[in-house]
Amino acid sequence: MVELLENISDEKLKEELLKISDPEIPVLSVFDLGVIRKIDVIDKDVNIELTPTYSGCPAMDTISMDLKIAIESLGYKANINLVLSPAWSTDWISEEGRQKLEAYGIAPPLEESLDAKALIEGERIVKCTNCQSTNTIMVSQFGSTACKALFKCEDCLEPFDYFKCLK
């Protein structure tokens, strides 16, 4: 969703917005995560529509505040609006974001049907972020946050989070 920045002429504003990350996954920008749905800049007003990854996501307050601080530090007025519809989906995570997740040690979400096979049926299809093996087992439906499950690789014995598919 970085293309949302294409119509912004202020390069400093673009730079500042690109620095805003998810506090729970600091390697992902809000653009990688796909939570920014729309940006309008009218004179000195910056209007942003932000969709939470789920309605109770505690990171949204921090992200909103980080956006507001970054925007206002450049002399703009920030208007951050939470938009709940359409609901956020893991499909909105950019390809670069998925690569960043894996490099950070979090397995990116599988497509919906494969996600169910991994989480419900216990199929060994979630790839270890350390050794790339699919000889992995789920340890817990919940990992470091509610949107992740905890897995363990049976080959290298390393634990890792898997980002659950959300539709």
Image (cartoon, helix red, strand yellow):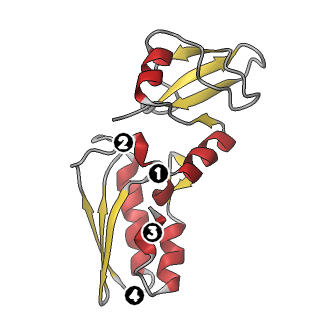
The 10 Å Cα crowd at callout 3, few under 14, some 14 to 19, many 20 or more, is few
Position of the C terminus by quadrant: top left
Q: Nearer the viewer, residue 156 or 165?
A: 165
The mark nearer the N terminus, 2 or 4, is 4
Distance (Cα) linking label 2 and label 4: 33 Å
Farthest top residue in view: 121
Q: Position of residue 57 (x, y in %)?
A: 35, 43
Single out the mark in the foreground, 3 or 4: 3
Label 2, label 3: how far apart the Cα atoms are: 18 Å
Give the residue at x 68% y 43%. 103
Please tell me which residue lies in front, 157 or 113. 113
94 and 106: which is toward the camera: 94
Among the 4 quarters of the image, the one containing residue 46: bottom left
3 or 1: tag closer to the N-terminus? 3
| The quadrant where residue 8 appears | bottom left
- Which residue lies under the disc numbered 3? 3
CA gap between label 1 and label 2 equals 10 Å
**Number of the label disc, if any, that sits on residue 75:** 4
> Which of the two labelled residues, at mark 2 and mark 3, occupies the earlier sequence position?
3
Q: Residues within 10 Å of mark 4 (few under 14, many from 20)?
A: few
Q: Amino acid at mark 2?
A: Ser
The disc, 3 or 4, on the residue closer to the chain's N-terminal end is: 3
The answer to whether residue 103 is left or right of residue 165 is right
The residue tagged 1 is 33
Q: Residue at x 43, y 33 (%)?
A: 147
Q: Amino acid at mark 1?
A: Leu
Query: Is any part of residue 127 visible from this angle?
Result: yes
Above or below: residue 157 compared with residue 52 = above
Label located before the other in sequence (1 or 2) = 1
Name the residue type under label 4: Gly
What residue sits right under mark 2 in the picture? 89
